[in-house]
Amino acid sequence: MANVFLVLHYNYAQLMCKTFQIRTTAPRSAGRGHRNCAYLLPHPHQSQHTANILLHSQGSMELTRPPLVALCVLLAVAIAGTANVATATEVGIQTTEAVSSYIVHVAPEHAPTLTTGAYGSFLRDHLPVELSLSNSDDQAPRVLYSYAHAATGFAARLTRRQAARLASSRAVLAVVPDVMQELHTTLSPSFLGLSSSSGLLPASNGASDVVIGIIDTGVYPVDRASFAADPTLPPQPRKFRGRCVSTPEFNGSAVCNGKIVGAKFFRTGRDALRGSRVLGAKDSMSPLDTEGHGTHLASTAAGSAAADASLFGYGEGRAVGVAPGARIAVYKACWHGCASSDVLAAFDEAIADGVDVISASLGTIKARKFYKDTTAVGAFNAVRKGIVVAASAGNSGPGESTVVNVAPWFLTVGASTINREFPADVILGNGETFTGTSLYAGQPLGGTKIPLVYGGDVGSNTCEAGKLDPAMVTGKIVLCDPGVNGRTEKGYAVKLAGGAGAILGSEEAQGGQARSSAHILPVSAVTFADAEKIKKYLKAKASPVATIVFRGTVVGGSPPSPRMASFSSRGPSRLVTEILKPDVTAPGVDILAAWTGAASPSLLDGDTRRVPFNIMSGTSISCPQVSGIAALLRQAKPKWSPAAIKSALMTTAYNVDNAGGVIGDMSTGKASTPFARGAGHVDPNRAADPGLVYDAGTEDYVTFLCALGYTAEQLAVFGSSASCSARTGASVGDLNYPAFSAVLGSDRRAVTQRRTVRNVGSNVRATYTAKITSPAGVLVTVKPRKLAFSATQEKQEYAITFAQRGNVTEKHTFGSIVWSDGKHTVTSPIAITWPASQVADM
């Protein structure tokens, strides 16, 4: 008898076998997976999702259904075939169901041993055959990543019905849609008070035994002094297990030089979400950074010293990272945006490699529930391993409750200014002068004023490319409104239309802040208020004229610094008001650091300029500053937990600018609040000796999640098998956090929160006394008011109670508690949120 084949989709073949209950005694070569079904073999001309049902003449076949069933099967073969071998007929089920990417969290007891294809088998075992059928390879279930350290589970391409079926399985804890996240220094180290002669920097040896993992757009090490091998560095830390991968565009052997010790890339999730087309002419399927963001961040955190650094002469000086001795491990997970599945894979690899600090300048637009936030899940498991995870607060300010990365195990960083500006004065024909900002470095306009027009009168108020009328723009300065396109794009559009220069107005919400950019023609960015005044001048004059004067780099005490950047995202947290976020602020405005050679400083395709350094702003820029400080503390204080390091940074932060006033808010022109600056501006040297720390670990965070009402399945997403039933009575506000935030309800009931502090100062017998600054409308009491430590009693507990004592005129009021032993001051901010019914009319 000749062999007879029926070619079917692989999963449909399984369905046919089960439906007709065909059993064969297949030859040994058939493999273990098909002992109870027809002998399945891949067809040489079919994809991996099709298979052959082989009725083998050497195996015994037994039909347990009536002969008619078997006859139907054989008849189907006979109609399609010949006497010897049937013609292959593919049977498929048509479907138009959309396929999306999902991250599947698997219960640890049901997770397979991670071998090649382990989660592919998991999918086949947990999806009914009828849900696995597809006439398209793109619609078949497909595993993208397997996770073992940052999470337990996998990322896969699934239909909605497949995802729902997996979510209903007892083996699956949660199925979360994959989403795209957005990417949120010659002077900043000295502004931070870091010195090679004293303080934290020499005490930590520059963090030479510490590895900082940078999850971002990669690194551009070619001819970059910031990443040059340093012969004075000791060998790579033995505990680090990472490596630099090699591709045709990235020589890993040459890149891994002692400064950079790891370089890997993750793009499978991004391609699944957006397609695998090349993103740009310079895009590289390697750890090579073609966007610049990751290179800037890596050198900010841990770049080696680079002499004579500047951007076209702006910010000129010696560029050096915050932790110049620290090693850098690059995990490229962002490609014009970051797929959550790629980010989680980067966390997974960084944990496995053994990094000490992770810097993640990325996040979703809005904060998500923690068990649905894959970055929060990855960070939780990193912190569990003792890894500090610093994350950016977001660039969606100054609106309230815009802060992201709000899980308490994150070290969340806002952005503020340093004492350096790049002024560019707009001088009108009537003599009025408005100081803006710019990084333009070409031929200046000169002192002679030239015609000034408003973009809205010459084709496009926002100065969009192709919409400006060259006949009305050529040789003139154009005033452009914010929005629609980027800042450098506006200037480029004016240049294409023949314009001589541009003035860029800012959004009204940004208040007193305008943003610097490396423009390709004379441009000054001014505040919203100044732009409105310039518009009034335009309307009042028949022939308005202006010029722009660029004043280079100005360092000094006016205006005061630091000031909170308008764009820096604000609290309170929309998820958990009791956790004050952001935690701290750090330099994040106009910071000079290394740049890629694959992109221009303006990021415009039409800009052919290439520079070794660039100046950028954002909480993504302030985050690596704190990552570098965390690296210094990690080496100086190796026994401290991530929570202790965060506590030290928060309780020693300062809240007064260099003029003696409260750190200002550029969006309002008034004093900032803890919802903008967190506990304050980081002070690395003071953080090395905080006196007391508020410590917390995995069990504390699990109790916190229980207090939020998380189910056992949601807890298990974080790798915890704990039961919340044993933690009844836990309060969200009782997490041992170095800050206080409470909501006072209309019932006027007082709120009590509890804390434990540990003495880490040199005096084991220290006694600390509390000083309270009560928020408006609140009576604050603390018990006890003194904490006495000893050699055998390094920890002490206290309770703080907030009680209403009158009406207020604000939604939020603020205060502080300071513990002092005469040498240390351990400061925690207090934020009170009031219900609308309690806020009196002003």
Image (tube, grey):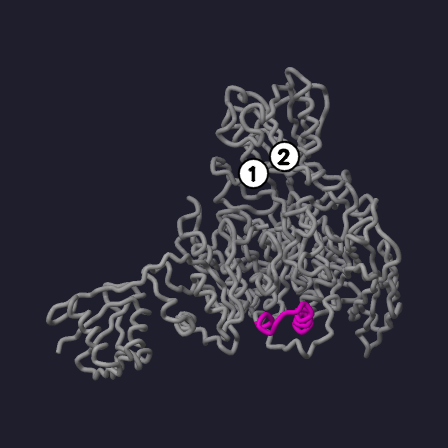
Quarter-of-image position of residue 541: top right
- Give above or below for 700 relative to 479: below
**x and y percentages locating residue 371 in the rendered image:** 59, 65
Asked if residue 46 lies left or right of residue 463, the reply is left
Residue stretch in magenta:
697-716
**x and y percentages locating residue 746 in the rendered image:** 80, 59
Main SS type for the magenta part?
A: helix
Q: Which residue is mark 1?
A: 486
Q: Which residue is mark 2?
A: 438
* Closest to the observer, 674 or 60: 60
Q: Is residue 431 visible?
A: yes
Asked if residue 687 lies left or right of residue 453, the reply is right
* Closest to the observer, 612 or 444: 444
What kind of residue is marked 1?
Answer: Gly
Write the residue at 36% across / 70% down: 129
What kind of residue is marked 2?
Answer: Ser
Write the residue at 53% across / 71% down: 173
**Mark 2 and mark 1: Cα distance apart in space:** 14 Å
- Give above or below for 226 relative to 516: below
Crowding at mark 1 (Cα within 10 Å: few <14, some 14-19, many 20+): some
* Closest to the observer, 353 or 318: 353
Q: Quadrant of the N terminus?
A: bottom left
Crowding at mark 2 (Cα within 10 Å: few <14, some 14-19, many 20+): many
* Closest to the observer, 227 or 361: 361
**x and y percentages locating residue 112 in the rendered image:** 46, 76
700 in the magenta segment: yes
Quarter-of-image position of residue 245: bottom left
**x and y percentages locating residue 152 in the rendered image:** 52, 71
Q: Is residue 26 visible?
A: no
Q: Residue furthest top?
A: 542
